[in-house]
Image: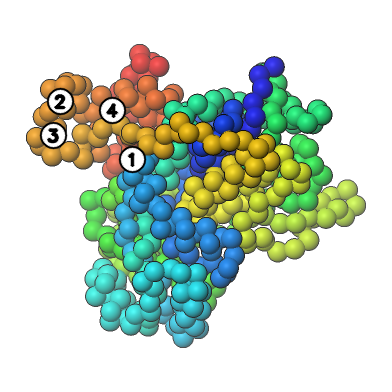
Amino acid sequence: MKSFDVAVIGGGLLGCFTARSLCRYELKTLLIERQEDVCRGISRANSAIVYPGYDNKPGSLKAQMTVRANAYFDRLCDELDVEFIRRGSLLLSYDEDCDRVLEKKLRHGLENGVPELCIVSGEKAMELEPKLSTMPRTALYCPGTGTVNPWQLGIAAYENALQNGCEAMLGTSVLGIEKSNDSYIIKTEGEEISCKAVINCAGLYADKVREMLFPPELRIYPDASDFLVFDKCAPRPEMILFEERPKGKALTLVPTVEGNLLLESSLRELESADFAFKAERRAELVAQARAITDTVSEDNIIRSFGAVRPNLRYVKKVGNEYVPCDKDISSFALDRPEPGFLSLMGIKTPGLSCANELGIYAAKTMADYLSAGENKAFEPKRRGISRINKLSKQEREALISAEPDYADIICLCEGISRAEIKQAIARGAKDVEGVKRRLGTSMGACQGSRCNYAISKMLEVEK
Ligand SMILES: Cc1cc2nc3c(=O)[nH]c(=O)nc-3n(C[C@H](O)[C@H](O)[C@H](O)COP(=O)(O)OP(=O)(O)OC[C@H]3O[C@@H](n4cnc5c(N)ncnc54)[C@H](O)[C@@H]3O)c2cc1C
């Protein structure tokens, strides 16, 4: 039986960053992910925002982590060679009650130490974002709000963890966990693994993994968000826009690092387990969004999808059933029923922003428990794949003369070459989706109809 110091269950953003942070210590680490690739759960369908920290209760762990994470994000993305853009954000208020919500958020933000946060008039908001279609009453302006590609960030952390000695078992489901003396025995479809500590980062299934060893206490009750993606050729706002409504934050509009506009509506109740986007919602969402910016049009939608949020609640036993006994837990739930078992459970927004902070916290907790020393050889820098479409004409010519496959453009919408796709496959992409997540192929207007066949042929040869 293979043995490790720490096993991380789940290769989403949290698992990948936890694995990377564990490599900063003298610890033999294993990441176990049931999908064939990392970042295929919640981490691949979210709003891609790096939050500044005004939404969170002053003094809370969430507030502290978010503010710290936001301040560190440029450096983190520089280490991992991932694009990050501070677009700035406006939280828009269209009525008096919402003005008061903005004032409260301003107070919270200032207490939390969010820099340059202020409330601006409707006129000033229109000046900051000329693509607003209706003048708001007021807006909470935050220059530090940013955006990053979530799965590229997670994949970068994963690659950096591997580069620093972490081992990974992909395509492997954890089916059970047992305690044997001071060790945990992790059961999979294939082999059993022994480890001294477990960090449960199983996202929507973190409650199931916890229940492999402990009685039910916390359970995940999902709800859904709807997303629309607009063609990058269409006009769009430059800033991240949040709409405050009496029922809470309604629409969010994000100009992504790739240049598309992403629209999220988070007010959908989850009927049954079906979180797929309902086509009839398109027109309704576009009409809602046009009240904020009339750059949005149904004609420019290139993709729609639904995403699931892992709401966490305490449960109690009633008869033979466990039923929720409290409202959603809004703080970060870092559950540690015994010293060697830590769960990062029900981590919703801002889990992307705080993935590095949460990973640092989880790794330090287990390093202290196992009295592990620092790994002085840890290398935080990871180099991404050189991207032909980001280079100047001169740089492109130099790259093509060194590697002629850079001249063979396979993804015409996004300008991605055969050389880049070959590197993505060499780095672990096993299918068309894996190439897409590493490079952005099939994310343009044609959604893969022109390149996916060629990519699948390359996968047959290169894998
Ligand atoms: C709609 C939505 C919008 C969001 N927007 C933002 C945002 O703009 N900014 C922000 O900061 N945060 C945002 N978040 C939060 C952020 O996306 C999440 O906090 C983060 O992605 C959680 O990552 P994770 O690693 O916990 O989960 P996941 O990405 O789901 O990873 C869990 C992994 O565990 C694996 N797994 C499960 N069970 C097992 C098992 N038995 N064995 C092995 N592997 C297993 C799964 O396959 C999965 O890959 C948003 C979340 C949602 C839902």
Taking the image as shown, residue 461 lies to the left or right of residue 131, namely: right
- Residue at the (27%, 75%) spot, across then down: 126
Residue bearing mark 2:
400
Please name the amino acid that badge 2 sits on.
Ile
Residue bearing mark 1:
81
Please name the amino acid that badge 3 sits on.
Glu
Above or below — where is 48 with respect to 23?
below
The answer as to whether callout 3 falls within 8 Å of ligand 1 is no
Measured Cα–Cα span from mark 2 to mark 1: 21 Å
Measured Cα–Cα span from mark 1 to mark 4: 15 Å
- Answer yes or no: is residue 255 visible: yes
Q: Return the disc, 2 or 3, that comes first in the chain's sequence.
A: 3
Q: Return the disc, 2 or 1, that comes first in the chain's sequence.
A: 1
- The secondary structure type at the circle numbered 2 is helix
- Answer yes or no: is residue 245 visible: no
Q: Within 10 Å of the Cα at label 3, are there few (<14), some (14-19), or many (20+) other Cα atoms?
A: few
The answer as to whether callout 1 falls within 8 Å of ligand 1 is no
Residue bearing mark 3:
395
Above or below — where is 90 with respect to 65?
below
Please name the amino acid that badge 4 sits on.
Glu
Of badges 3 and 4, nearer the viewer stands 3
Above or below — where is 61 with respect to 41?
below
Q: Position of residue 218 (x, y in %)?
A: 74, 51
- Residue at the (22%, 51%) spot, across then down: 233
Quarter assignment of residue 9: top right
Q: Position of residue 225 (x, y in %)?
A: 52, 55
Taking the image as shown, residue 392 lies to the left or right of residue 437, namely: left
Of badges 2 and 1, nearer the viewer stands 1
User: In the drawing, what numbered circle is on residue 420?
Assistant: 4
Q: Cβ–Cβ below 8 Å for labels 3 and 1?
A: no
Q: Within 10 Å of the Cα at label 1, are there few (<14), some (14-19), or many (20+) other Cα atoms?
A: some
